[in-house]
Image: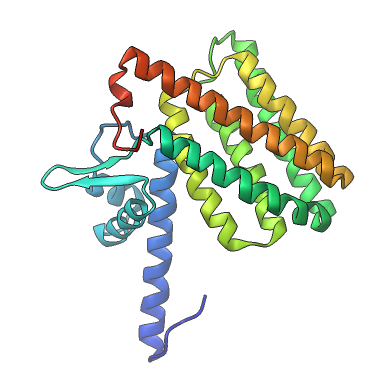
Amino acid sequence: MKFPPGPPFFRLTFAMSTSLNSKAYKHVRNLIMSDQIEVGERLSEARIARELGVSRTPVREAIRRLCGDGVLYQVPSSGTFIAMPGRTEIIEAYEVRESLECSMLIKAVKKTLPRHRVALRKYLQQMRMAARAMRDAGDEYLTGEPRNLFLEADMAAHSLILKIAGNDMALGIVSNAQLRNRIFGNHSHRRDLEHVSRVLLLHARLTRAICKGDSKMALHWMRTHIRESRHEAVATYAEQAKRNDPRQLSWGRD
C-alpha cells in the first residue's frame, strides 16, 4: 500500500481506515454473493456494522463503492437495495467476461506454475464435492452450502486465471461482471443435476488444458463455458419475463 505524505500518526490512521473500508467492502459483497440479502430487502448499515464490529463509516464507503459498481442502488428516504440486472446488462456482463477472460487466458497458460495447477485442481475438487453432496442428498436443485461451495470454487478458478495473467484491471472488471451474473443467478437459476454436471465437465476440461499447457483447447473450453452460461441466463430471463415474475421487475436495462 502506498501511504500519502504526512506525519506517522496520519499515515497510520489512513492505513487503518483503508483496511476497514476494504474489510467492509468484501463483507457486503460476500453477503450479496451468498444470497444473505434478498432482492427487495433494504440493507441495514447498522446490522452490517455490528457484524463487523466497526462504525458505520466504512460500511457507508463500501455501499458507495458497490453503488458505483452498479451492484447496489439507493432510494432517497427508503434505503439501499440490490440492483437486479436487466437483460442487456446480463448480456454485456458475459460479453465483457468472454473478451477479457479469453484474452487473459492465453497469457495465463504460458505463466502457469505448479502451485497454480494445484490450486486449480483444488477448486475443481471442491466443485465435485458440492455436486456429490447435492446428488447424495437427493436434492432436485443445488441449494444451501453446496451451492455456495460450488459457486465460490467456480469464481475462484476464474479469478486465479486472471491473477496468473497478471492484469489487475482485468481482474477488477471481470470480478464486477461475475458479481452481476451471480446476483441474477442466485435469484433466477434453478441449477439441477444436469446443469451442475455440465459446468463441472467444462471446468474439468478447462483445468486439464491449462495444466497441460494447451492454450488452444483451454481457449475453446473457456469460450464454450461462458457462452453456454450466457445462453442459459438469457433464456431464464425470458422465461421469467413471460411469467411476469415480480423478482424480474428490475432496475436494469431490458
The image quadrant where one finds the C terminus is: top left
Above or below, 144 relative to 79: above
Above or below, 28 relative to 4: above
Q: In front here: 230 or 84?
A: 230
The answer to whether residue 58 is left or right of residue 148 is: left
Measuring from the top left, give residue 61's x and y in whole percent.
31, 60
Which residue is situated farthest in the left direction here? 77
Whether residue 121 appears in this view of the structure is no
Whether residue 75 appears in this view of the structure is yes
Measuring from the top left, give residue 250's x and y in whole percent.
30, 32
The answer to whether residue 185 is left or right of residue 79 is: right
The answer to whether residue 22 is left or right of residue 67 is: right
Quadrant position of residue 57: bottom left
Circle count = 0
Measuring from the top left, give residue 251's x and y in whole percent.
29, 37
Q: Residue at x 54, y 26 (%)?
A: 147
Measuring from the top left, give residue 34's x and y in whole percent.
45, 35
Q: In front here: 148 or 47?
A: 148
Q: Residue at x 38, y 55 (%)?
A: 24
Q: Residue at x 29, y 52 (%)?
A: 49
Q: Residue at x 83, y 46 (%)?
A: 215
